[in-house]
Amino acid sequence: MPATYKKIASATVTGSNTASIEFTSISADYTDLKLVVSGRGTRSFEVDDLVIQFNSSTTGYSGRRLLGGGGAPGSSPSSDTLTDIRGAVPGASCTADVFGSTEFYIPNYTSSNNKSVSVDAVGENNAVASYNWFVAGLWSNSAAITSIKLFANNGNIVVNSTATLYGIKRY
Amino acid sequence: MPASFEPIASVTLSAATATVTFTSIPQTFTDLCLVCNYGTSSSGRTGTMRFNGDTGNNYSWRAFSGNGTSPGSGGGSNVSWFYFTGQVTGDGTTLDNVSITHIMNYSNTTTNKSMLSRSNDPARYTEATVGLWRGSNAAINRIDLGRDNATNWASGSTFTLYGIGTGA
């Protein structure tokens, strides 16, 4: 039986911090993609955006975000619109060795429709500087996704960050 | 190696359809995951979910959402379905919406069943929903996905039910 949830590729940042992580030549053998990231950024702040781009395209991205920040429990969440699709990584202001988690789910990544992306991101810090957000993302482009680039919007991705791309097949 | 994330059934609509139904769901997994990529015929309407054909007022749900301007929440008790998606933009052709729903421990016969759903319309909202079905403690063997106010899922929409667990 063919694998229906298979690791396509994985990357671990080693040696020195990196500006981006890229997956190229993504197989069209699956129906959906899931990208799971454990990461941290160098930005001198509590959090940095972990932006995803497809096929080296810098245009056509939009989204809506629901954001729970680092206030006291029960403090008000917020919502905003985006001109990119983003998860998040804890920044340099967070406690040492704290890494955050982001999951990107991309159904029908080879279709000729626009690509919808569901994003969940969390960063717990045992301090005020924590976050939890959901994103509804859209790449308005009919091309099949063949490459993915991840980068921190205001810095680099630190050593020991990992990103794993899974292929999911519905039949 | 036994399958741990296996497609049970998948539906791609060839025409606008009011209800998508998964029947005879095998009881060989521990959890279910439903992935939907869809459009709709009308704006401002939600996706509904029922288990085992139960049309009684045995469902409740709570949702937490953001529309790009402000957060919001809502819910329903003693109603006849879950809302498992938010109120989407509808034009009948655009397939921009996605939902990912987890149904935990679906085959047990001793507890009520709950679900967690993440749904998105990039033009309208992002949302997380929790739902509870109190109709019976029966194992879930059927799932109906409808739309409120007699609206339709758009042609081309895809719905896939995965089983998670050790397999048979």
Image (cartoon, rainbow, N blue to C red):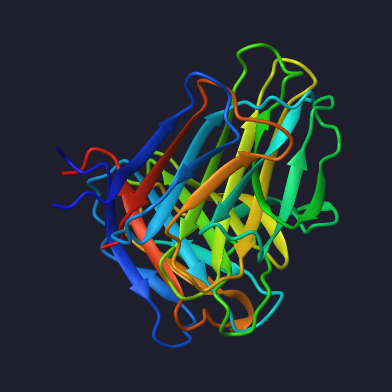
| Residue A13 appearing in the image | yes
Does residue A113 appear to the left or right of A171 in the view shown? Answer: right
Residue at (58% x, 53% y) in the render? A53
Does residue B8 appear to the left or right of A62 in the view shown? Answer: left
Residue at (85% x, 56% y) in the render? B69
Residue B118 location, x and y as percent? 58, 52
Residue A29 location, x and y as percent? 28, 60
Give the total of numbered labels: 0
Q: Is residue B6 above or below residue A40?
A: below
Does residue A55 appear to the left or right of B126 in the view shown? Answer: left
Q: Locate the C terminus of chain A and report the quarter of the image it occupies.
A: bottom left
Q: Residue furthest top?
A: A96
Q: Is residue A90 above or below residue A166?
A: above
Would you identify the image quadrant in which residue A74 lies? top right
Give the camera-side residue of A104 and B17. Answer: A104
| Residue B76 appearing in the image | no
Give the camera-side residue of B148 and B128. Answer: B128
Residue A77 location, x and y as percent? 82, 41
Residue at (42% x, 53% y) in the render? A33
Would you identify the image quadrant in which residue B105 lies? top left
Q: Residue furthest bottom?
A: B15
Residue B99 location, x and y as percent? 53, 59
Does residue B80 appear to the left or right of B13 in the view shown? Answer: right
Q: Is residue A45 above or below residue B152?
A: above
Residue at (27% x, 58% y) in the render? B8
